[in-house]
Amino acid sequence: MEIRGLSGSTDEAWQGQANCMGVDPELFFPERGSSTREAKEVCRGCVVRVECLEFAIANGEKFGIWGGMSERERRRVRRARLGQQRDAVVAS
C-alpha cells in the first residue's frame, strides 16, 4: 500500500515500517459487506499503526482499513475529536 502525502511525495518515514508492506493491498480494501478481520489483524501489532491512522484521518481517506480502522470507525473518531474541540472552545 503506497501512501502519498498532499504534495504527492511518498511519506516513507513510517510507511517502510508498516506490517502491511508486501501484503496484497486488496486485503485492506474489501468489497462492501466483506470481512475486515484479516486486514485489522495485520494492523494489530504494527508499530506505525497510530501514524497510519492519523494519516488516514488527516487526509480524509474514505475507503479501506487504515491504522486498524474502517472508514466508519475513523468517522466516529473524527466526530469525537470535533466534539472535544467544540467543548474546549466553549469552556474557554
Image (tube, helix red, strand yellow):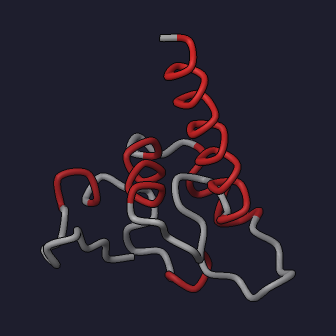
Which quadrant does the N terminus fall into?
bottom left
Tell me if residue 69 comes above or below residue 46 in the rendering.
below
Where residue 55 sits: x, y (%)?
38, 56
In the image, taking residue 76 as reference, residue 44 lies left or right, namely left
In the image, taking residue 90 as reference, residue 71 lies left or right, namely right
4 or 58, nearer to the observer: 58
Residue at x 48% of width, y 51% of height: 53
43 or 11, nearer to the observer: 11
Where residue 20 sits: x, y (%)?
45, 65
Task: Give the quarter of the image for residue 15.
Answer: bottom left
Residue at x 62% of width, y 54% of height: 74
Tell me if residue 43 comes above or below residue 88 in the rendering.
below
Task: Give the quarter of the image for residue 12.
Answer: bottom left
Where residue 88 sits: x, y (%)?
52, 19
Where residue 83 sits: x, y (%)?
64, 34
Residue at x 79% of width, y 85% of height: 32
